[in-house]
Amino acid sequence: LTAVIAELHGYGFDPFFSVDCVPAPSNSMMNIAWIYQSGLGLGERDFYLTPDPKLKAGYITMVQKYLSAAGYADANASKTLANDVWNFETALARVFIDKNALRDPDLTNNVMSPDEAAKLFTTFNFNNYLKTAVSRRPDSINVVLNSYFTGMDKLLKTQSLETIKAYSIFL
């Protein structure tokens, strides 16, 4: 999973989380790495938490078509996997932090070392991710709300490999 996430991030896709270089919360003259929530195909968590039936049906159909076109699964399997992707993204949306909370500089200021950040992840090796995905290991990382990352990590433990693959292929 570590290598797949690093490769997808290298192509500009952001499953599970995003990494960026942004000014430090307490010193705008210094750039540091930031990691923050990402990975919803519809972009906004409210689309999943209170879904419009037409939007949900259209999204599932689109995911199914992408999976079929990619040759990942036949029509029946792609329909099941598309529903699994919807259910996974809905569960991910439940651990997403509300956009209004993300505007609070006190809540989003969680600067720590890469080794401290790595402790948030048990489903993949964050230190190996950093070795693969970034050109130089950052001295510090601002983790935008630890609760998202611990929630995402718990969620990944409950998902089948097939669901994670289908999600990664689609996203």
Image (cartoon, rainbow, N blue to C red):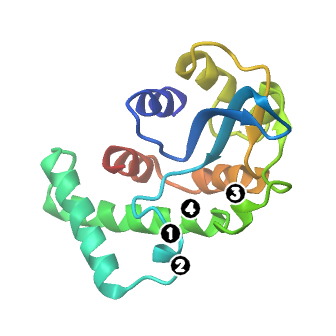
Q: Amino acid at mark 1?
A: Thr
| Residue where numbered disc 1 is placed | 90
Question: Mark 1 and 4 residues: CB-CB less than 8 Å, in contact?
Answer: yes
Relative to residue 125, is residue 18 depicted above or below?
A: below
User: Which label was assigned to residue 151?
Assistant: 3
Query: In the drawing, what numbered circle is on residue 49?
Result: 2
Verify CB contact (< 8 Å) between mark 2 and mark 3.
no
Q: Position of residue 28 (x, y in %)?
A: 77, 34
| Residue 92 circle label | 4
Q: Earlier in the sequence, mark 2 or mark 4?
A: 2
Q: Residues within 10 Å of mark 1 (few under 14, many from 20)?
A: many
Real-space Cα distance between discs 4 and 3? 8 Å
Secondary structure found at label 4: helix
Q: Amino acid at mark 4?
A: Leu
Which mark sits nearer the N-terminus, 4 or 3? 4
Whether label 1 touches label 2, CB < 8 Å: yes
The spot of residue 17 in percent (x, y) is 57, 45
Q: Which residue type does callout 3 highlight?
A: Gly
Give the SS element for disc 1.
helix
Q: CA distance from mark 1 to mark 3?
A: 13 Å
Task: Name the residue at 64% across, 46% down.
Answer: 36
Which residue is painted at 32% across and 79% down in the image?
55
Query: Of callouts 2 and 3, which one flags the residue occurring earlier in the amino acid sequence?
Result: 2
> How far apart are the two marked residues, 2 and 3, measured between alpha carbons?
16 Å
